[in-house]
Image (spheres, grey):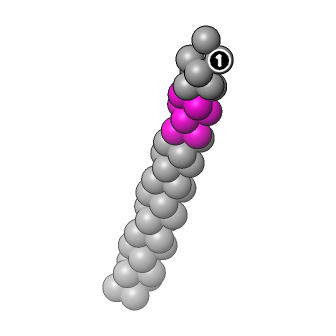
Amino acid sequence: MSFLLCIAQYLVEMVILLAIGLLGAFIGIKLRKHKDAKKAAEATVMADEKNE
């Protein structure tokens, strides 16, 4: 019985760590897309100013 409880504990820990890893990945992707969009907007403004 204790063997099954040990396996269940490791499975719960694995699921928690997996959730933390996925959350970190999604946050990182969102932040990177935001940074890239901001950089592209700045480049557009600089190009518009250069054409004037």
Residue 44: % across, % down? 39, 72
Q: Residue at x 55, y 25 (%)?
A: 7
Q: In this rendering, does residue 27 appear at all?
A: no
| Residue 46 magenta-highlighted | no
Residue 41: % across, % down? 44, 66
Q: Dot 1, crowdedness within 10 Å: few (<14), some or many (≥20)?
A: few
Of 21 and 44, which appears nearest the observer?
Answer: 21
Residue farthest to the bottom, as pictured: 50
Residue picked out by circle 1: 2
Which quadrant would the N terminus be assigned to in this image? Answer: top right
Residue 29 to residue 8: above or below: below
Of 48 and 39, which appears nearest the observer?
Answer: 39
Would you identify the image quadrant in which residue 23 lies? top right
Residue 42: % across, % down? 48, 73
Of 31 and 13, which appears nearest the observer?
Answer: 13
Tell me the amino acid under the disc marked 1.
Answer: Ser
Q: In this rendering, does residue 29 appear at all?
A: yes
Residue 20 to residue 49: above or below: above
Residue farthest to the left, as pictured: 51
Looking at the rendering, the stretch of residues picked out in magenta corresponds to: 10-18
